[in-house]
Image (tube, rainbow, N blue to C red):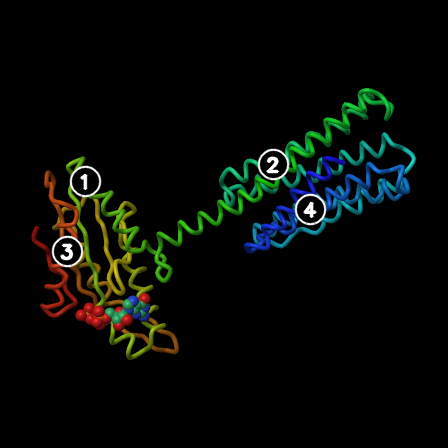
């Protein structure tokens, strides 16, 4: 009874959390715990409730609780649940219990086998999707599921091997105690693990939102500045060259004014893609401002950076941009290049400023061109 109250409290707490945030399967998981908490009194209060009802409904509820947890896990993954796997064992349990109403040993074995396989399947599905849920929450959940599997299979083996022959024997009492304590511990691990998984995923999403520009999918201003600071201090430490390109789309306001803001957004996405497709794996690209991009080129002297800038300039000018509705336009960009040669100890901000000055000159000199900065 105490185990039931403890699990009921956990399920209440879990369901309460779903009121505060989008559930992501937590409501089903909490529902599973609630059904589990109900199954225990139905199974244990046998003298007070009809025996057949207790056996069939209690064991089926137990199986349903695992099915609901599996369903909750599918919901967390944003996948359609496999109904055979989630609800099939519940019917199987009900039928087996009904068939063996007067054979306790058989019921314990079948119940252990079905429930153990259910939790094992849940653990296997979680393991298969482990790339989607890396983190400590997943590990706790997996431990909880495997612990439940062990307990269920241990019950099966204890009866199958003849180690527990009568329900009143010391072995049976020990098995029952271990089962309840183990089940409570597993339920706790499962609940904490599932909530942990939801939190870890939310944290990862927030980190991504904080680093990436929503429109273009490339690094945002803060992230590219951090990347630049890291790469430039690395270049200084190892006495390597480094260049940056400050790229600004020409007359972008006209694009917005003529074709509308969504068309302007499309141009920004296309240009980001064009630039990104011509960079090496070690280079970094970020959206520095509205229609301004910053490219960081490690191990690249200014002359090589200027060559790449020329190539980008020509590529942007030559590529028609499809705005939909049969409209396609050509745009151009101006680029300021600045680089530090080997052994130079210039401050990072000086490099950015030099590329900005060079970009300003490129604009002044007629746009659609590359200018090199002087440090
Ligand atoms: N569509 C769209 N427009 C943006 C976004 N961010 C900034 N802009 C627009 O970018 C335009 C920048 O205009 P300006 O700074 O005058 O630059 P420009 O028209 O490109 O002129 P030059 O740089 O001198 O060639 C403004 O109209 C902003 O509203 C965005 O995310 N989407």
Please tell me in which quadrant of the rendered image residue 362 appears. bottom left
Q: Residues within 10 Å of mark 3 (few under 14, many from 20)?
A: many
Q: Residues within 10 Å of mark 1 (few under 14, many from 20)?
A: many
Please tell me in which quadrant of the rendered image residue 370 appears. bottom left
Instruction: Read off the residue under disc 2.
Output: 189
Label at residue 227: none
Instruction: Read off the residue under disc 3.
Output: 355
CA separation, marks 2 and 4?
Answer: 14 Å
CA separation, marks 4 and 3?
Answer: 60 Å
Query: In the image, is the residue at mark 2 within 8 Å of ligand 1 by its beta carbon?
Result: no
Point 76% across, 34% down: residue: 113
Label at residue 235: 1
**Do tag 4 and tag 3 residues touch (Cβ < 8 Å)?**
no
Q: Residues within 10 Å of mark 2 (few under 14, many from 20)?
A: many
Instruction: Specify which label sits upstream in the sequence, 2 or 3.
Output: 2
Instruction: Specify which label sits upstream in the sequence, 1 or 3.
Output: 1
Instruction: Read off the residue under disc 4.
Output: 32
For mark 4, give the secondary structure: helix
For mark 2, give the secondary structure: helix
Q: Closer to the camera, 333 or 235?
A: 235
């Amino acid at each position: 009874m105490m185990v039931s109250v403890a699990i009921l409290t956990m399920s209440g707490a879990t369901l309460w959390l779903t009121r505060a945030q989008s559930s992501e399967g937590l409501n089903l998981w909490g529902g599973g715990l609630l059904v589990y908490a109900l199954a225990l009194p139905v199974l244990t209060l046998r003298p007070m409730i009809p025996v057949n009802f207790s056996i069939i409904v209690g064991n089926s509820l137990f199986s349903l609780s695992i099915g609901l947890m599996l369903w909750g896990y599918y919901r967390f993954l944003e996948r359609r649940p496999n109904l055979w796997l989630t609800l099939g064992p519940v019917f199987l349990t009900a039928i087996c219990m009904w068939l063996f109403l007067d054979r306790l040993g058989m019921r314990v074995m079948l119940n252990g086998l079905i429930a153990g396989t259910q939790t094992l399947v849940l653990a296997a599905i979680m393991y298969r999707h482990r790339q989607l849920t890396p983190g400590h929450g997943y590990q706790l959940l997996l431990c909880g599921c495997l612990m439940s599997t062990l307990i269920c299979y241990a019950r099966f083996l204890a009866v199958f091997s003849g180690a527990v022959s009568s329900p009143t024997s010391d072995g049976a009492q020990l098995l029952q105690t271990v089962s309840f304590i183990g089940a409570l511990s597993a339920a706790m691990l499962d609940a904490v693990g599932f909530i942990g998984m939801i939190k870890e995923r939310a944290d990862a999403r927030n980190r991504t939102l904080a680093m990436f520009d929503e429109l273009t999918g490339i690094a945002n201003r803060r992230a590219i500045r951090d990347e630049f600071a890291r790469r430039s201090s690395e270049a200084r430490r190892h006495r390597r060259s480094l260049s940056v390109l400050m790229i600004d789309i020409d007359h972008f306001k006209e694009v917005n004014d003529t074709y509308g803001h969504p068309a302007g957004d499309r141009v920004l996405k296309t240009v980001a893609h064009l630039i990104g497709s011509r960079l090496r794996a070690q280079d970094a690209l970020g959206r520095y401002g509205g229609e301004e991009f910053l490219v960081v080129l490690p191990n690249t002297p200014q002359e090589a950076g200027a060559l790449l800038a020329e190539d980008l300039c020509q590529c942007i000018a030559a590529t028609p941009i499809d705005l939909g509705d049969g409209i396609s336009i050509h745009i151009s960009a101006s680029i300021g290049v600045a680089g530090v040669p080997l052994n130079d100890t210039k401050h990072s901000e000086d490099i950015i400023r030099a590329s900005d000055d060079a970009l300003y000159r490129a604009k002044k000199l007629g746009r659609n061109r590359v200018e090199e900065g002087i440090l």
